[in-house]
Every structure is written in C-alpha cells, then in structure tokens.
Amino acid sequence: MKRRKLHRVEDSLLLENLEYRGSYSVDTTVELISFDRDTLRHKRINSAAGLTAAIDPQKVNWVHVRGLSNTALISDLCTVFDIQRLSVQDILNADHIAKIEESNGHLLVIIDVFDYNENNVLMREHLSIVLGKNFVISFQESADNRFKMIADALSDKLGHVRCRQADYLFNLLMSTVVDRYLEELEIQQNMMLDLEDLLMEFRTNIEGAGRKIQDYRKDYLTLKKSIFPIREQFAHLLVLDSPLIAESTHIYFKDTYDHLQQAYMMVESCRETIVSLLDLYLANNDLRMNHIMKQLTVVSTVFIPLTFLVGVWGMNFHFMPELDWTYGYLAAWLVMLGIGVLIYFYFKRKKWY
C-alpha cells in the first residue's frame, strides 16, 4: 500500500516566519473601497504607504486582497491595521482550521469556501476576514471575484450596505460564504440521490460506484471540518458583547447563524445518506451476484437431464436398440432439444429466469 508523504510542520511560535502554505499561484492584488452614504471611492493599492494615505477614517474601508503569495506586502498591510503576527500566520496558512477569535481590537475569521468544478470535484479555498472599528479586510487565495455581488451593491447603492457600518459589511461577507455552503451541499445531495436511484436498480452495473461513494465521504469530512467549528464559534460570537458589533446589527448576524444551522443539518443529512449509499451498494452487489448465480443454476438445471441421457446412451451395451436404429442419432438430438426447450419455458412461466 502506498503511503502518503507526511509534511513536516514548522513551529511558528519558534520561527515567527511568514510563509504562504497553499496551492494557489496567484499574484497578490489589493483593492480599497471607501464608502459612506453619499460617496464611494475605489482604488488599487500597491504598497502599505499607499494604503495608509488612501484610508479615510471618516468612512468604512473595505480592503480586499486576492492572492497570498506576496507575504511581505500582506505583512505590511496588516501592520497598518495593527494585526498581530500570529494572526497573519493564520491568514497565510491555508490548512488552518476554521475559527473566530477576537484579539487586539480585531475580530478575525478563518474560514474555507468550496466550489464544485466542471468535473464535480470539490475545490477548497482558504479565506480570512478581519473586522476593525471602521474597516474590513478580506483575504482570499484565488483571483476569483467571489464578492462581486457585494461590490456591485456598493457601487449601485443597493440595499442598506452604504448606510451601515463595517460590522454590517463583515456579516455580508460571512453570509456570502455561508450561502455558498448551502449551494454546494445541495449539489452534493442531488448527486448522492441520483446515485441512490441508480443503485436501486440491482441489475445495473454502475462503473465506479464505490469510488463515487468514497469521494462523497471525503467531501463530507472536508465540509464538516469547516462548518462545525465555525457554527459553534459563531454562536459564541452572538452571546459575547463585542464592541465591534453594534446591537442594531445583531439581527443580521442571527440570520447568518440560522443559515449556518441549516448548513449543519444538511451536512448531518449527507452523513446519513452516505451510510445508506454504502449499505445499498453492498446490497446491490449481493443482489447482482445472486442474480448471476440464479442464471447459472437455471442453465445447469437445463443440462442435467441432457447429461443423464448422454450418459445412458454412452454406455455402449450390445443390446441397446438405439445403437442399431438408423435414425437413433437424430432422435437423440430431438429428444434432448425438446427437453431443454420445455424446461426453459417452464422456468419462464414460473418467472424464475
């Protein structure tokens, strides 16, 4: 059995180095959107100095970072907002478990977002969101415009986002990720239900059904690893009286938590479906094997009397009348064919075949 290669994990507390640990090779780009009820400014940022000069303390500032390869730039940007170095290491660590923590006047969310590609393979992306007094910073590994709907809403003055503070924008970003969970879980459930319908036809040999079930199980474990911790910690966030979250915004956070609860129940439902798929797959194999054995048994039953006749006529006794009969050979064939046909139609009538 081929063993997986184990990756040596360095002690970040000892080395305090910054290294992106992920699989995306995307150049780092930084965008700043500063807005209030009446105005909005969108600017591309190339350095920490440029960010410092562009931030408007009288407005809500959304800094969106795509690509985590330029660790020096990300470190400088986090220094501008006084984000701790350990938090920066968590932002750059794509394998970090999902979590929510508040420290040094910031609220940090480490979360994963998922997408099924054209080959129905679940793709995972590391995402981090930081909430401050008047700013929100979002970090994503890929170059996808994942929050395009929110950016368009800001530009077109849709909804209440231009009239709210940073905590409302923070919850919108979280809600977008959670709603994506619901979409991907629904896709997974539909694929499993389609496979379940196919497995109900026990005569159908589904190529790679066992591998598909194993893939669904791996996807379930991946989704569970991300959704369960964030659900529990999001519940604690609602209980805590954080100064970063206004009381008027709690109702929107509760709505996001309700969606997390729904995602949690869908993940639990996927676990039960996978168990039933595995049982159905094993039962399907047994039923198909029984069907094959039944066919072989019917064929053997047809040839049993024919084998008996051949054995009798093969004894070659001297006084066997069939041996000297001119039409004995033809008559033997007609008798054996007739017996075989009669047995076949008898089994057909009894629906044993």
Image (cartoon, grey):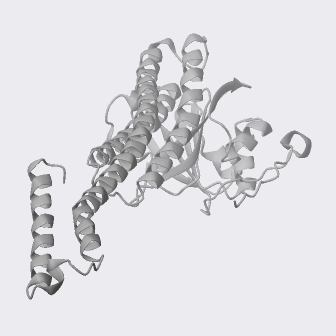
Asked where in the image residue 89 lies, by quadrant, the reply is top right
Q: Foreground: 212 or 346? A: 346
**The C terminus lies in which quarter of the figure?**
bottom left
Asked where in the image residue 207 lies, by quadrant, the reply is bottom left
* Residue drawn at point x = 42 percent, y = 25 percent: 265
Residue 225 drawn above or below residue 124: above
* Residue drawn at point x = 22 percent, y = 69 percent: 309
Residue 286 drawn above or below residue 226: below
Q: Is residue 62 visible?
A: no
Could you say where residue 325 lies in the image, as x and y percent from the top left? 10, 85
Q: Foreground: 74 or 232? A: 232
Could you say where residue 300 lies in the image, as x and y percent from the top left? 29, 61
Could you say where residue 110 lies in the image, as x and y percent from the top left? 62, 36
Q: Is residue 80 visible?
A: yes
**The N terminus lies in which quarter of the figure?**
bottom right
Q: Seen in the image, is 299 located left or right of residue 180?
A: left
Q: Seen in the image, is 348 located left or right of residue 158?
A: left
Q: Seen in the image, is 261 located left or right of residue 80?
A: left
Q: Seen in the image, is 121 located left or right of residue 112?
A: left
- Of all residues shown, which one is farthest toward the bottom? 326
- Of all residues shown, which one is farthest toward the front? 319
Residue 336 drawn above or below residue 201: below
Total marks drawn?
0
Residue 67 drawn above or below residue 250: below
Could you say where residue 16 lies in the image, as x and y percent from the top left? 86, 44
* Residue drawn at point x = 75 percent, y = 58 percent: 5
